[in-house]
Each structure stands twice: as structure tokens, then as C-alpha cells.
């Protein structure tokens, strides 16, 4: 069983080059970045997931491949439900050869394995169907998210049409008061449009949840809490 079995060229995820470490948790922030702050399997973003946590998933489970526990190429960023459904499942070589294995977005082409049909995903290959069935990729919450995305997409389109119409208005037709106000708005829109050209960064910023960012004071807090508890316990009468 090898880790890499997909078709790299058209994968949506490109991995960072990372330094080896013995603790896989050290890769957390690299994984969030590389996986677009989204689940590797169901593609829910951190922001969309609201209260649902994210975890580091071992594509080859820790219980089976101890040698790959801290291997960056074996780690994926996944939402809690997908990670839980996958659990420690590790298809055999025969099963994998028959396509009964999990899709992985860093090596496989999503468009080859899945198609969107309304709010549902359909498998186009055994790998796609296996992943949909075992990870419940048509679960209710994901269909709700797809519906919201569709509405947002349509709203964005309407807004863009409106902005384009505004930018195309000939200002000579306007009276001076309206014209001044109009120019203000137009300048602001043009600045926004210029700022929005950094496509990939914008997508990441949009997907990222600050609730999953590391607390910069965490180490301090842990130390303070431990010291406080030790001090409190020291005051208690000793039990012989
Ligand atoms: Zn997921």
C-alpha cells in the first residue's frame, strides 16, 4: 500500500514544502493553508462549518501505518464528521485496485470522480461513489450548505451586473449634486475591484475561521493555569 495513487496534475491541492518534524500537530497551519481552510473530503469551509471542528486526518490510519504518522503527504485537513466517518478504515490493496478507496484532493481530480446534481453529489467513478457513500457526502448539512452557496453565487452575480451598469453610466446625464456623489461611489467600487485581484488569497481569507486560529496566549495560559492549580492544591491539608 502506497500513499500516492492519484493523478496529481489536475488536483486542486498543492502541498507546501515542509520541514520534517516528529509531531504531526506541528503541520496544522500548513494543512489549513494548503487545503484552502476547507475539508479535504466534503469541501465545507471553516466559516461554513460554524460550530463543527476541524481535525488533522491521517489518510493512511495511524493504527495501520505508524511510519506515516508525521509524514506531511499523509495528512489532510478534514471536518469532524468526515474524519469521524472515515475513522481508522483502511481499504485493502485488492479493494483499492477495484476503486474502493477514499478520494484525496491533493492527488485526484475532483471533476473526474464527482459531479454535482442539484444539491447532491454523484460519483462518476468507483472512488467517487465509495467516498460519497462511506463519508455521507450527501448528508443534510452539506446539502444545506450547497443550497446557501448557490444562493450566494446568484446574489453575487446580480450585484456584479448592477456594478457593471453603474460603472457604465454616462455622468453627463446627471445633475451636479448627484454627479459628485456618484463619482465618490464609483471610485470606491474601482478601488474594491483592484483589491480583489489577488484571487487565491481572497478565497483563503473568505474560507478561514478565526475560531480555528491558534490562541497566541495559549502557552502562557496553560502555564498560568498549571501554576494556579498547584498553588491552590498546596494550601489543602495533606492527607497522610
Ligand atoms: Zn468534511
Image (cartoon, rainbow, N blue to C red):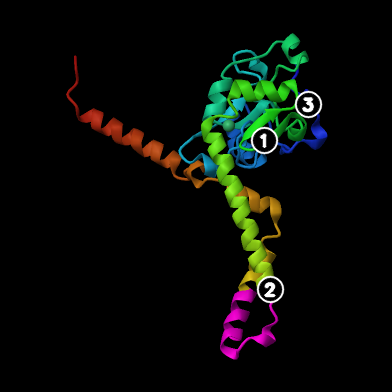
Residue for badge 2: 167
Which secondary structure type mostly characterizes the magenta part of the structure?
A: helix
- Image side of residue 158 versus residue 220, left or right: right
| Distance between the alpha carbons at the discs numbered 3 and 1 | 24 Å
The spot of residue 79 in percent (x, y) is: 55, 32
| Distance between the alpha carbons at the discs numbered 2 and 3 | 46 Å
The spot of residue 103 in percent (x, y) is: 70, 26
From this view, report whether residue 84 is shown above or below residue 151. Answer: above
From this view, report whether residue 55 is shown above or below residue 92. Answer: below
Residue for badge 3: 6
Question: Is residue 169 shown in magenta?
Answer: yes
Question: Is residue 227 shown in magenta?
Answer: no
Tell me which numbered mark, 1 or 2, is placed earlier along the sequence.
1
Of the two numbered discs 1 and 2 in the rendering, the one whose residue sits closer to the viewer: 1
Quadrant of the image occupied by residue 44: top right
Q: What element carries label 1?
A: strand
Q: Residue at x 69, y 66 (%)?
A: 194
Q: Is mark 2 on a helix, strand or loop?
A: helix
| Distance between the alpha carbons at the discs numbered 1 and 2 | 36 Å
Q: Residue at x 67, y 84 (%)?
A: 171
Residue for badge 1: 117
Residue in front for this viewpoint, 205 or 68: 205
What range is drawn magenta here? 168-187
Q: Is residue 157 visible?
A: yes
Tell me which numbered mark, 2 or 3, is placed earlier along the sequence.
3
The spot of residue 105 in percent (x, y) is: 71, 32
- Image side of residue 106 versus residue 48, left or right: right
Amino acid at each position: 500500500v502506497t500513499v500516492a495513487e492519484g493523478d496529481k496534475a489536475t488536483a486542486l491541492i498543492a502541498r507546501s514544502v515542509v520541514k520534517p518534524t516528529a509531531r504531526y500537530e506541528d503541520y496544522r497551519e500548513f494543512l489549513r493553508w494548503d487545503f484552502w481552510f476547507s475539508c479535504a473530503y466534503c469541501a465545507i469551509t471553516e466559516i461554513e462549518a460554524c460550530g463543527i471542528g476541524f481535525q488533522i486526518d491521517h489518510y493512511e490510519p495511524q493504527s495501520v501505518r505508524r511510519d506515516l504518522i508525521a509524514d506531511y503527504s499523509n495528512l489532510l485537513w478534514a471536518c469532524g464528521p468526515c474524519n469521524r466517518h472515515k475513522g481508522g478504515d483502511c481499504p485493502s490493496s485488492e479493494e483499492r485496485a477495484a476503486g474502493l478507496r477514499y478520494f484525496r484532493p491533493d492527488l485526484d481530480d475532483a471533476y473526474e470522480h464527482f459531479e454535482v446534481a442539484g444539491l447532491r453529489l454523484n460519483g462518476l467513478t468507483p472512488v467517487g461513489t465509495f467516498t460519497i457513500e462511506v463519508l455521507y457526502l450527501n448528508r443534510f448539512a452539506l446539502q444545506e450548505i450547497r443550497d446557501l452557496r448557490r444562493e450566494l453565487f446568484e446574489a453575487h452575480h446580480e450585484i456584479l451586473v448592477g456594478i457593471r451598469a453603474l460603472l457604465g453610466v454616462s455622468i453627463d446625464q446627471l445633475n451636479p449634486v448627484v454627479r459628485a456623489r456618484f463619482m465618490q461611489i464609483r471610485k470606491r467600487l474601482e478601488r474594491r475591484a483592484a483589491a480583489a485581484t489577488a484571487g487565491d488569497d481572497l478565497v483563503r481569507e473568505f474560507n478561514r475561521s478565526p475560531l480555528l486560529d491558534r490562541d497566541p496566549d495559549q502557552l502562557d495560559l496553560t502555564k498560568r493555569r498549571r501554576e494556579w492549580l498547584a498553588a491552590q492544591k498546596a494550601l489543602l491539608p495533606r492527607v497522610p
